[in-house]
Image (cartoon, rainbow, N blue to C red):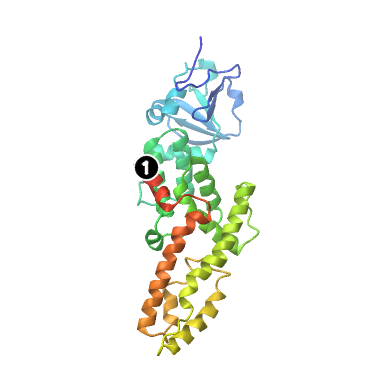
Amino acid sequence: MKRCLAGGAQSPDSSGCIADHENRVTVKFCFSTSKVSAGAARAFEFEDCGLIIQAENTLFRVSRDFLALQSPVFKDMLLLPPPKPTDMIDGCPFVILPDRAEDVTVFLKALIYYDFFVPHPGHATLPVVVSVLRMSDKYQVDALRKRALLHLSSVFPTTLLQYDALEIDRPSVSELPLVLSLARDLSIDWILPLALYWRCADLSKNCHEPLQYLSTSEQSQLLTASWTLATALSSKILDFLWPTVVAGHERCSASRFAWRRVAERWRQDSMPLEIWDEGCWNMLSEVCHHCLRNMKNQEQSTRQAVWDDLPHVFGLRAWSELEKMKTEALE
């Protein structure tokens, strides 16, 4: 009798493998308990549940009906006839998933424990968000996917106003590659400009940072963008310090020129959007209020222009298109 999964999946082969190419899922119903490593660590279990999942060397005992209710992929997967009693573990059928045990742990906790992965603006660490988003996209749990996208989008805003209002630390050196890989895989393009901008900030401090997660062309593009940010765009931000000749404002011009020379030395360690912050204005005490107001207006408009240009620097679509993608994904 032919056994198939819904959605065009293949029937089991002689080894018991089932490949669901549409959902990029490969599972195996194992027909011998000897295929489970004797040293497999047991994660959380529920005694009244009837499905055991194995991911890497970790086992999870969960409710098959609950998973089928949450995920159409699991629902289709579990339509197969149950194995013989002698082919089960603890009296339960089990499934081997190709995912990382850490991702499966986070995903199941997010499904089962209501307070583990709370909606934004509740707190969620970036590694948890990445795991939930990757797994919920793969197993088509739309509610969790949207929740994870909201969390991720709050860390990577699409406007300068939102960026300046961020109250969280930016992702660490180890977290950004995870985010960039996820964004590429799932086409979350609207977070890429800022994620790549922050990656360039890390490269400016450590030019030997590994970039194996990027293709050769992407590595070249990132290094070129990093150079552009540190040179042309940082210089552009500081243009408000170039003195303008205004009769009666010679003292202002001299002060601006002196601080331009100082600020030029900051370019090596600063990114354009951060090279001049609010506290720097206190150094221009010798500049009159009229000149200071004009300088602030110029600096603000230039920062906005640099922000608007970020997608172009990284070869991406304009912010307007990226924001449209974001809106559609979060609807």
Which residue is pictured at 41% across the width and 50% down the height?
A: 153
Looking at the image, which is closer to me, 3 or 281?
A: 281
Task: Reply above or below: 9 against 71.
Answer: above
At which x and y percent is residue 293? 36, 78
Task: Reply above or below: 254 against 122.
Answer: below
Circle 1 sits in a helix, a strand or a loop, which is it? helix
Question: How many other residues sit within 10 Å of disc 1, few (<14), some (14-19) or many (≥20)?
Answer: few
Q: Which residue is mark 1?
A: 328
| In the image, farthest residue toward the top | 1
At which x and y percent is residue 69? 37, 28
Which residue is pictured at 45% across the width and 41% down the height?
A: 133
At which x and y percent is residue 225? 57, 58
Looking at the image, which is closer to me, 27 or 242?
A: 242
Q: Is residue 161 visible?
A: yes
The type of residue carrying mark 1 is: Glu
The quarter of the displayed image where residue 307 is located: bottom left
Looking at the image, which is closer to me, 308 or 52?
A: 308
At which x and y percent is residue 18? 54, 22
Which residue is pictured at 40% across the width and 44% down the height?
A: 325
The quarter of the displayed image where residue 229 is located: bottom right
Q: Is residue 170 visible?
A: no
Q: Name the quadrant of the C terminus.
A: top left
Looking at the image, which is closer to me, 216 or 97?
A: 216
The image shows a total of numbered marks equal to: 1
Which residue is pictured at 38% across the width and 85% down the height?
A: 288
